[in-house]
Image (spheres, rainbow, N blue to C red):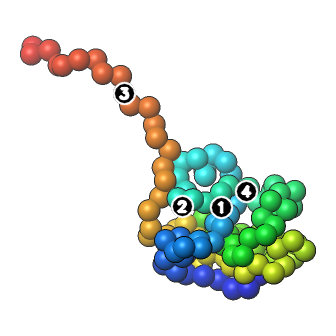
Amino acid sequence: MDDEIDPSEVESLLDSEDPPRVVDIRSPGSFARFHIPGSENVPFAELPDRVASLEGADRIVTVCPHGKASIQAARLIKSYEGTADARVESMRGGLEAWEGPLEEQKTAAEPDEGPEAPF
């Protein structure tokens, strides 16, 4: 792992010409509820088997709820030969510290039962 990165810097980088790959290590259900736009879900338990999918990335930012487990994920990613040259950082404070936009799961709208009766 190279370092921790502030959420505000991650947000700025996402708007740049060469954004980092943001790897959200939460469960698929948690990721589906909300996540940083453009992030990809690689649950922590699956990371050892899927780290090769990050090969060739120049910069990788790991994300978790509070910024603790993502440090371990960043270390694991950095130790992989195919990502050894990448800049690998953990987002400080995790999603709890994120103030940027989030993509949220769209829930089905309640069925329209027509106008309320006047009585």
Mark 1 residue type:
Asp
Q: Identify the mark nearer the N-term, 3 or 2.
A: 2
Q: Classify residue 4 by image quadrant.
A: bottom right
Kindly check if marks 1 and 4 are in contact, taking CB atoms under 8 A apart as contact. yes
Q: Residues within 10 Å of mark 2 (few under 14, many from 20)?
A: many
Kindly check if marks 3 and 2 are in contact, taking CB atoms under 8 A apart as contact. no
Mark 4 residue type:
Val
**Between 51 and 109, which is closer to the camera in this rendering?**
51
Q: Which residue is disc 2 drawn over?
A: 36
Q: Residues within 10 Å of mark 4 (few under 14, many from 20)?
A: many
Q: Nearer the viewer, mark 3 or mark 2?
A: 2
Mark 2 residue type:
Ile
Q: Position of residue 87 (x, y in %)?
A: 72, 81
Q: Position of residue 7 (x, y in %)?
A: 53, 76
Residue 71 is at least partly visible in this image: no
108 left or right of 89?
left
Q: Identify the mark nearer the N-term, 3 or 1.
A: 1
Q: Secondary structure at mark 4?
A: loop
Q: Position of residue 44 (x, y in %)?
A: 76, 60
Q: Identify the mark nearer the N-term, 3 or 4.
A: 4
Q: Residue placed farthest to the bottom in the image?
A: 3
Q: Secondary structure at mark 3?
A: loop
Q: Which residue is disc 3 drawn over?
A: 110
Quarter containing the C terminus: top left
Q: Which residue is disc 4 drawn over?
A: 42
Q: Which residue is disc 1 drawn over?
A: 24
For the residues marked 2 and 4, what is the alpha-carbon distance in whole angstroms?
13 Å
